[in-house]
Image (tube, helix red, strand yellow):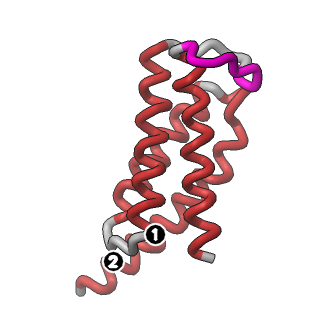
């Protein structure tokens, strides 16, 4: 199950690369119908980097992966809302990542006491 979770995070991160590629016109992305400005393209790249880092930290069993996961989900979901027509299905992996992150945070808090 842990491998599936890492794949979900990494794949979701890779999808965020599409917004960056579209914004900087590195390739034609027909799947994204809305225009993406360069500042938003940078945010898509930041979300990609945070999600990939989250997947790596989780895979390496870092106890603080959830912190990066929550930040990544917040940025990702903000982009999903702004680009809703093209990105609405990004909410599904964001919910999964957020729920597992909250669970890990709860475990961290319980173990600290």
- Where, by quadrant of the figure, is residue 113 drawn? bottom left
Q: Which mark is residue 108?
A: 2
Pinpoint residue 76: horizontal percent, then vertical percent: 52, 40
Pinpoint residue 43: horizontal percent, then vertical percent: 44, 29
Q: Name the mark nearer the viewer: 2 or 1.
A: 1
Magenta region includes residue 53: no
- Neighbor class of circle 1 (other Cα within 10 Å; few <14, some 14-19, many 20+) is some
Element under disc 1? helix
Q: Residue at x 71, y 28 (%)?
A: 86
Residues in magenta, as a range:
25-32
Q: Residue at x 48, y 21 (%)?
A: 40
- For the N terminus, the image quarter is bottom right
Q: Is residue 103 above or below residue 37?
A: below
Q: Which residue is mark 1?
A: 59
Q: Residue at x 42, y 54 (%)?
A: 70
Pinpoint residue 94: horizontal percent, then vertical percent: 58, 51
- Where, by quadrant of the figure, is residue 26 drawn? top right
Which of the two residues, 56 or 79, is positioned nearer the viewer here?
Answer: 56
């Amino acid at each position: 199950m842990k491998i599936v979770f890492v794949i979900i995070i990494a794949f979701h991160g890779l999808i965020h690369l599409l917004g960056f590629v579209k914004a900087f016109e590195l390739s034609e992305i027909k799947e994204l119908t809305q225009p993406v400005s360069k500042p938003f393209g940078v945010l898509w790249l930041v979300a990609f980097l945070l999600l990939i880092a989250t997947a790596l930290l989780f895979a390496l069993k870092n106890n603080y992966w959830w912190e990066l996961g929550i930040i990544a989900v917040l940025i990702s979901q903000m982009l999903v809302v702004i680009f809703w027509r093209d990105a609405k299905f990004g909410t599904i992996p964001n919910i999964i990542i957020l729920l597992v992150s909250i669970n890990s945070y709860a475990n961290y808090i319980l173990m600290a006491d």
